[in-house]
Image (cartoon, rainbow, N blue to C red):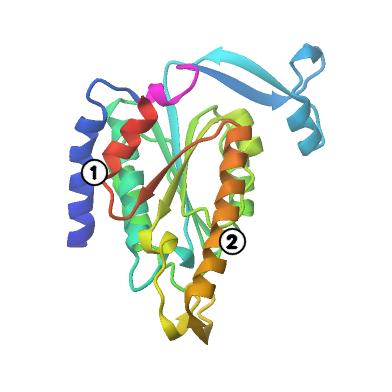
Amino acid sequence: MNHELKTLQIKARQSVYTLLSGNNLSKLHGEGYDFSELREYQIGDDIRKINWTISAKLGTPYIKELHANRELSVVVSTLMDGSLYFADGNAKQKKITEVASIIAYATQHQNDLFTGVSYYQNNIYTTPPTKQIFNIESFSKQLFETPVLNTKIDHQKSIDNLFKQIHKPSLVFIISDFLDEVDLSLLAQKHEVIAIIIRDRSEENPIKLGETVLKSPMSGFTFDTFFGKRSINNYLKNLKEHDSKLLEHFSIYGVRYVKIFTDEEVVGKLLGLMR
């Protein structure tokens, strides 16, 4: 096994004890263990339980019911493409692997069900609902080794596919840099959704480069440009508008979120979600 990956996994397993000291992943679920189930309307169902918002979006009646579920189902889904390869390295990809591994190990430690779903170029890697370390470490390895440079995924298609894949009401973590627009409204109606935004600090604090050659990590396209103060201001303006719209969307649909930079410790940021 890759030495760097093994070191990351060991660190992730050790971090679980700090994360769960006096805590439980169920704290991340707004209603404890009382989950809501979303299913198609059947003749005889109480029409007062119809969720009209989801029914309108899906084009068929759906009802929402509460039920108790003592075993927590945790799903970690990652959206992976070339945008994770920033500057001269894949620090964002490594941080995604670390975050996903910590959540997976914590789920297994509590004897709850973990499912990993990773979207990358024209592919989906999925673990079965599991409590086995082998499946968790296979998922971690997949995230670490996924070739992301010069690839691009459709983030919204991935989210729509995830909605269809998860049948059991779950605690769902979406891990991405969230530089593409996504609509999590349907997913958040059925599940408790937490967005984990992974960014490199230099993405939000770029420096002047002057005359330079820029290369798209998604298409591989290169171009000569002058990256100075005006370019930085335009870039930051667009990024701020994008992030403001993203966080407003999260707020409207009850999606909690945390931003983790590549140079930050993960556990402290996850603990903030439990408070």
Q: Where residue 178 appears, x then y in whole percent?
A: 52, 53
Q: Where residue 128 appears, x then y in whole percent?
A: 44, 40
User: Is residue 25 depicted above or below 96 in this figure?
Assistant: above
The kind of residue tagged 2 is: Asn
Q: Where residue 59 appears, x then y in whole percent?
A: 82, 36
* Residue at disc 1, secondary structure: helix
Point out which mark residue 215 bears: none
> In the image shown, does 120 or 93 lie closer to the viewer?
93
Q: Residues within 10 Å of mark 2 (few under 14, many from 20)?
A: few
State the residue position of label 2: 238
Q: Residues within 10 Å of mark 1 (few under 14, many from 20)?
A: many
Residue drawn at x 28%, y 37% as measured from the top left: 268
Q: Nearer the viewer, mark 1 or mark 2?
A: 2
Residue drawn at x 23%, y 48% as measured from the top left: 9
Point out which mark residue 12 bears: 1
Position of 122 compared to 207: left or right? right
> In the image shown, does 207 or 165 lie closer to the viewer?
207
User: Quick check: is 30 in the magenta stretch?
Assistant: yes
Residue drawn at x 56%, y 36% as measured from the top left: 166
User: Is residue 48 depicted above or below 172 in this figure?
Assistant: above
In the rendered image, the quadrant that contains the N terminus is bottom left
Specify the quadrant of the image occupied by residue 211: bottom left
Give the residues in magenta: 25-33
User: Quick check: is 235 in the magenta stretch?
Assistant: no
Q: Where residue 261 appears, x then y in whole percent?
A: 35, 52
